[in-house]
Image (tube, grey):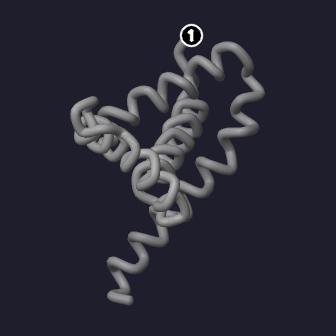
Amino acid sequence: MIPEPWTFALLALAAFRIWKLIADDRILDRPRDWVLGHIDVKRGGTYWSDFLTCPWCAGFWIVLAWTVAWWIEADTLVVAVPFAISAVVGLLGTAYYAVSGE
């Protein structure tokens, strides 16, 4: 099933926000550093670090999880809404600071 445009945008923004939360947000610095610090380099430590911070790599799996959840239960969109709105606020805030020079 292919999502309607609004559903697509909602799921995409929610997936972006989850990726940003996992890959970059300061609130998860300590858990992310702990997890990555406990992955032995011989077992692909650099690979996992790259995987978690890459929007193409981790992003695919995050989008897949959102899509499967939506296929199984349409009410998944209710959960996606706060993440999507958060993504829009973050993107607009970043644009605002870039334009205003603050």
Query: Residue shown at 51%/54% (left/top)?
Result: 31
47 left or right of 31? left
Q: Viewer-proximal residue, 32 or 11? A: 32
Dot 1: what SS?
loop
Give neighbour class at mark 1: few <14, some 14-19, many 20+ (Cα, 10 Å): few
Q: Position of residue 43 (x, y in %)?
A: 27, 30
- Where is the N terminus found, in terms of image quarters? top right
* Percent position of residue 44, x then y: 25, 32
Residue 31 left/right relative to 80? left
The picture quadrant where one finds residue 55 is top left
Residue 86 x %, y %: 59, 57
The amino acid type found where label 1 is placed reads Met
Residue in the picture at 39% in, 70% down: 95
Q: Looking at the image, is 67 positioned above or below residue 72?
A: below
**Badge 1 is on which residue?**
1
Q: Residue at x 48, y 32 (%)?
A: 62
Q: Residue at x 33, y 77 (%)?
A: 98
